[in-house]
Each structure stands twice: as structure tokens, then as C-alpha cells.
Amino acid sequence: MPEPYRKTLVRQVSQHAHSEIIGMQPEGNWISRAPSLKRKAILMAKVQDEAGHGLYLYSAAETLGTPRDEMFDQLYTGRAKYSSIFNYPARTWADVGAIGWLVDGAAITNQVPLCRASYGPYGRAMVRVCKEESFHQRQGWEILYTLSHGTEEQHQMAQDAVDRFYGPALQMFGPPDSDSPNSGQSMAWNIKRFSNDELRQRFVDMIVPQAEALGLTLPDPDLQWNEERGHYDFGELDWDEFFSVLKGNGPLSRQRLEHYRRARDEGAWVREAAAAYAGRQHQEQAALAGA
Amino acid sequence: MSFASHDSATRQSQGEAITPEEIASSDAVADEATARYAMILGDDALMLSQRLSSWISRAPELEEDVALANIALDLLGHARFLLTYAGTAWGKTEDDLAYFRDEEEFRSCRLVEQENGDFGRTIARQLIFSTYQHQLYSRLVHSTDPTLAAIADKALKEVQYHQDHAAQWTLRLGLGTEESSRRIQDGLDSLWSYVEELFLDVDPIPALGDVAVLPSSLREDTLHRLREAIEAAGLTVPEMSGAYGSDRTGRFSEQRGYILAEMQVLARQHPGATW
Ligand SMILES: [Fe+2]
Ligand SMILES: [Fe+2]
């Protein structure tokens, strides 16, 4: 395998894995306050799935020769990137719905083509991940639908969440093609199959009718059907905001990383204990075999 | 089949999902005393699930995020069955009972209400509670109340996994490093005075006969199994008497109020709303 191909692939897969891990935080923050036991169970299962996705993806990246601890370290030290969307706060219960519908929805749009990516273990991990992401999207949509059709306050809560998450969700596909340095090479290698703008368009075309069904509006006055193109036209996104968040100035960029670091730091003694125990078991078995 | 339990990829325990909706729509209606018993069991499961779930995204290893979420999810499932069944006595739903009861109306034991502390303390609590719960459900499967027996049957397989998970970690921490052994021993020491409360025959259990399992009848086997697991890990079974106030009323606990304040806040801001 050519080294530049391997490097690009490890970067893509590990960034995806990091996004799953950091992505547990915004929604995890609502598990304790979920407003019904059924919603609590669904949300807990969802966040657990994201941890599982992180696990498969780190394993896929490991098959490319980069150890898991090295990837953890990259995230820990802030050298690794993850999806900027998770640096936004989940302030209300409706945000849990908006994240499921828009963020998991954008993730699916990004990831479904990757199920046929040129590197087998990544493609196979993605098949499993995508199957679960579509349940996640559906549960988010259901949360919003229930809120939108609930009390006046609940409807407001849903609209406000969609207003805040719409732009950042569209930016999950990355900068415009004219401004995306690595895309061309990745497409040539078939580890990325459609351009940022193509995927963004696909996503907008998908969510416009879904928003109508929800009874909610999307915060873009320029959004309209273009008969000629057979697609929705949409307005310019705030790319200054995007690049600023990307550089680490998101509303919660620091807290997300600190949360991750604290968990790693506080768990260090546990991992040491598990390693010491395993080492001793191993020695005892070796001694038995030698006896 | 519930969405949560069916679709999650990373479940590790063996339990087959029955749903609270199935219990709610069946003809089974609990009598008052049985309902109060189901509430005791359900409240324990709910409080522990609430505590454990805050480990998600904070565990020492990614595998443990998954495992602890899995256990919290199992317990939440048990709580949902039990509270749904309890609610049938008063025409209430699981959510009425979980979100709209006040502190003094809950019947959880203090052990499950204790703060997570570090991983050692959480594992100590898991070991004690899952060992007790395993004994409990192994007997409750013979309940003359068919709904309780069915719930116990589903829960038993899951609790078996919880007990194994806790025992495995107790070994690793007890025999791992000096620090880990000290931390789990500290956990056991700080929680042990709440063990006796598990075995108290509180109202209405003695009057329920073969519908329920008498807590005092679980004491010997539970303590025996705990002693085995603790000593196998090179740790010491704490010697102390039970903390005063073992009546599950909440009158002797400071933790319950904080748990409920967080759990109930949103539901209570919107009484009568659907989610
Ligand atoms: Fe995911
Ligand atoms: Fe997801």
C-alpha cells in the first residue's frame, strides 16, 4: 500500500472515530434529564452505539498499522481533528432531536458512499455504522415531530433547535469544493466518492421535504426548488464561522477536549491495573506451561 | 420490541426484550401491596441506572463506556417493567411514577443512591448490588405473581452478566496495582454500612407471601458470595454494622433529592406534555 494513501486513509478513519467519541458528549449530557423513561432508554442506546462506532473505526484504523493508543494520544493532545459540529452545545431537549435528525442525517449522507470505499475494513465498518446511524436519524426526527406537534413551548423549542443546527450541519460536509485542499486526491483514490458540494446538495434535497413533514421551517430565506437543476437552491453559509470553529474557537471546543482528557486521566490507574493483572495472569500461565 | 434494546449493536447481555408497553397493555393489574413491592424493586433499578449512566463518555476505556451503558440500559429496562406494573394498581404510567413522585415517595435503598465516586467505588457498588440482585431474581422467578415472575426471568440473565462484570473488575482492581487495590477497598469500606438495608423486610413484603422474596432470606447467600468475590481479589470484607435508618423512606438520605432534581427537571417544567 503506498504510504500517502495509507496516511490519508488513517487520517480519515481516525478523524471519523474521534468524531464518534467526542460526539457522545453533547447528547450524553441529556441522558440524565431525558423527559420520559422511553426516551432515556433510546438516547442511552444511541450514545452507546456511538461508542461502539468509535471502537469499530479505531480497529479499522489499527489494521492500517496505527496503534489505538497513538490515535487516543493525538486526540488527547489536541492534534487530531474531529467534526466541528460537536463543539456546539446541546442546550435543550430539542437539540437531541435536531442532532439526531440533522447531524446523524448529514453523517449518513457522508458515509453511505464510503460503504463502497476502496479499503475493505473501512467499508465493512461503515456498513454497520450506517445501519445504526439511520436509526439515530429516525429517533431524532421522531423527537422533533413529537415536539413540533406538542404544546406551543415544545414547538418553539423544536424550531429553535433546528434554527441553530441547520447551518453547522450543512457545514459538516466541509468547505466548498473550490476551497477544499485534500478532496481531489481522496476522490482519485476512491476513499472519498463524492465532492463536498455534491454531498451537501444531496443532504439539502433530502431534508427539505422532511422539514415540511415536521411542520418546521429551515432558517434560509434563499431556499427554493430549482426546476431546471432538479435540486433545491440554498443560500451562502457562514464560512467565517466555520473556519473559526475549525481552528478551535467553537462555543465548547475547550470543554469537549477537557472532558475527554479528564476521563483519560481519571481512568489511567484503572488501565494500569488491568494491564498489571493481565501481565501477571500471563506470567502464571507461562510458569504453569513451563513446569 | 423496543427500539432501544433491539437496535443497539453493542449490547452484551443475554436478555430478551419484553417491553413495558406489553405489560401496560396486558390484563395484568397489580394489587396495592404487590404494586408497592414492584415499586421498591423498580426504584432501586431506576436510581442505579441513573447513577451509572453518567459514566457514559467518562469511562476509563471505550469498552467500559459500552459496558456501563449496557448495564445502565438493562437496569432502566427492569425499572420500566416494574414501574409500569406497579402503576397498574393506581392507573398511573411508568413516567407518572418516575417523574412526578416526590422524594419521600420513592423506595430506593441508599446503596444505589450513592455517588459514583471513582471507578473503584462504582465497581464496589456494582459488586454488592448485582450480587444481591442476582440472588433476588433467581428466587423471584418462582413468584406466584406471573408478571413479576416473567420480569425476573428476563432480568436474571442480564443481572448475571452484571455480576460477572463486577466480579471480573474486582479481581483486576484488587490484584492489579497497589493504587487500584487501595481504591476498590476504599469503595467497599465507604459503602458497606448500606449493605444491611438490602436485607430488611420492609412493608409490605412480609405480608406478600410467595408473591415476593423476603429480603432477609437473601442475606446469607448474598454475603457468602460477596465474601468469596472480595477475598478472591485479595481484599477485605469490611466489618461494620449497618447505618441507621434502613427503611427506604429517604428520610435518612441526602442523595435522593439531587438525583430527582436532575432526572425530573424537564418533565416537571412541562406537566402533561408528550415526548
Ligand atoms: Fe455514530
Ligand atoms: Fe449516530
Image (cartoon, rainbow, N blue to C red):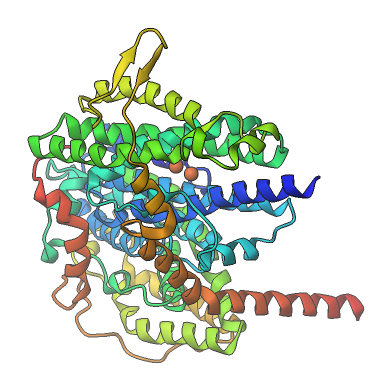
Residue that sits furthest to the right in the current view:
A290
Please provide percent x and percent y for residue A62.
Answer: 69, 54
Can you say whether B81 is above or below B130 in the image? above
Can you say whether B199 is above or below A142 in the image? below
Can you say whether A70 is above or below A83 in the image? below
Residue B57 seen from this side: yes
| Quarter of the figure with the N terminus of chain B | top left
| Quarter of the figure with the C terminus of chain B | top left
Residue that sits furthest to the bottom in the current view:
B239
The mark tally for this picture is 0
Residue drawn 52% across the image and 43% down it: B9
Residue that sits furthest to the top in the current view:
A228
Please provide percent x and percent y for residue B228.
Answer: 55, 79
Please provide percent x and percent y for residue B122.
Answer: 42, 73
Quadrant in which ligand 2 is drawn: top left
Residue B1 seen from this side: no
Q: Nearer the viewer, residue A259 or A4?
A: A4
Q: Nearer the viewer, residue A120 or A168?
A: A168
Residue drawn 27% across the image and 47% down it: A37
| Relative side of B232 to A220, left or right | right
Please provide percent x and percent y for residue A120.
Answer: 72, 37
Q: Quadrant of residue B172?
A: bottom right
Q: Nearer the viewer, residue B160 or B166?
A: B166
Residue drawn 24% across the image and 52% down it: A91
Residue that sits furthest to the front in the current view:
A178
Residue drawn 36% across the image and 85% down it: B190
